[in-house]
Image: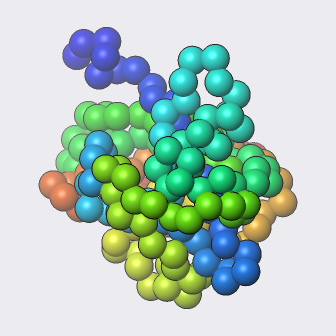
Amino acid sequence: MNETKRRILNVVVAGIRNTAENKWLLIRRERGDYIGKWALVGGKLEFGETIKEACLREVLEETNLKVKWKKQTAVINERLIKHNTKKQLKQFLIFLAETTVKSGNVKETDEGSLSWFSEEEIRNMKRDIIPSDFFMLTNILIPNNQFPETIEIDMIQNGNELYIAKIVNQNET
């Protein structure tokens, strides 16, 4: 396996909440990993950026929204593993942040289509959202956990299907 396939991708992911309507913004991925799945907005952390700077930049680039940074809510080490093997396909170190809309109007880019969803709609979309993003929404962002967590997630890929095999909260071990 060559070195480019073995590197850990550092990414920022933003839970973007419209407080006036109590809805969350999701993007339906049209590029990169997990094409066709709904996801939280985010992207790669660039060299020299702080986590906050990267989050605000990615949100603006992918949505045209300026958001208010509320807090970093978790650090997640996500490993993508091929079904029926122990072959690790990818690894992401995810910095999850909670944000709220400050200004701007949603404008789609080539990253994917954007839509606002209520908490109830999100809970009913489990099969349509990337499993780890569904976990982040329903276990961290929506219930508004008040403490930073370090979480290990093993996600299995079986063809086009994705599911979580293991979740470990490192604060509880």
Q: Nearer the viewer, residue 53 or 9?
A: 53
The colouring scheme, among rainbow, by chain, secondary structure or one colour, is: rainbow
Q: Position of residue 88 (x, y in %)?
A: 31, 34
* Viewer-proximal residue among 161 and 168: 161
Residue 86, position in %: x, y? 28, 37
- Quadrant containing the C terminus is top right
Q: Is residue 137 above or below residue 78?
A: below
Q: Residue at x 77, y 63 (%)?
A: 145
Report whether 51 appears left or right of 127. Answer: right
Q: Is the residue 68 above or below the residue 92 in the image?
A: below
Q: Position of residue 85 (x, y in %)?
A: 22, 41
Measured as percent of width and height from the top left, residue 66 is found at 66, 53
115 relative position to 148: left or right: left
**Of 162 and 63, which appears nearest the observer?**
63
Residue found 31% across the figure and 16% down from its top: 4
Furthest-top residue in this view:
3
